[in-house]
Amino acid sequence: MARRESAPHLYAVGQAVRLKGGFAQRAQAKGVYHITRTLPPLGEFPQYRIRNDDETHERLAAQNELEAVNTTGGADLISRTFGHG
């Protein structure tokens, strides 16, 4: 039987991500997380250990539960939008 290849890891250690999901999930786990470790896939999606600076523990998340966060240019956008700086 042919072995099915899993998706490649899209996120790297140290990268900022956010948990996707419905309203209830976001309320419990909102904020920016950083990838602390890449893990082998469980099923078809690669797994990651992620951590938020405000929490004392790490979480396990599948790649399809995450979205990348753009952490560059945020201050510039605020100053352009509101005229501060």
Image: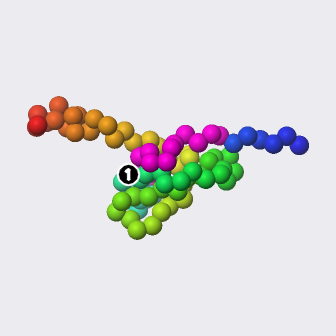
User: At which x and y percent is residue 29?
Assistant: 41, 59
Location of the N terminus (image quadrant): top right
Q: How is the image coloured?
A: rainbow
Residue 15 is inside the magenta segment:
yes
User: At which x and y percent is residue 84?
Assistant: 10, 37
User: At which x and y percent is residue 33?
Assistant: 41, 53
User: At which x and y percent is residue 13?
Assistant: 49, 48
Q: Of residues 18 and 57, which is closer to you in this image?
A: 57
Label 1, residues with CA under 10 Å away: few <14, some 14-19, many ≥20: some
Q: Residue at x 48, y 51 (%)?
A: 35
SS assignment at label 1 = loop
Q: Is residue 40 left or right of residue 56?
A: right
Q: Main secondary structure of the magenta part?
A: loop
- The single residue placed furthest to the bottom in the displayed view is 56
Q: Is residue 27 visible?
A: no
- Figure quadrant of residue 25: bottom left
- The single residue placed furthest to the right in the displayed view is 1
Q: Kindly identify the amino acid type of the residue bearing the numbered disc 1.
A: Val
- Figure quadrant of residue 15: top left
Q: Is residue 71 above or below residue 54?
A: above
Q: Tell me where the magenta segment starts and ends, as one range.
A: 7-22
Location of the C terminus (image quadrant): top left
Q: Which residue is mark 1?
A: 32
Q: Is residue 80 left or right of residue 57?
A: left
Q: Is residue 72 visible?
A: yes
Q: Is residue 42 left or right of residue 11?
A: right
- The single residue placed furthest to the top in the displayed view is 80
- The single residue placed furthest to the left in the displayed view is 84
Q: How many numbered badges does the structure rendering display?
A: 1
Q: Residue at x 22, y 39 (%)?
A: 75
Residue 82 is inside the magenta segment:
no
Q: Residue at x 50, y 61 (%)?
A: 59
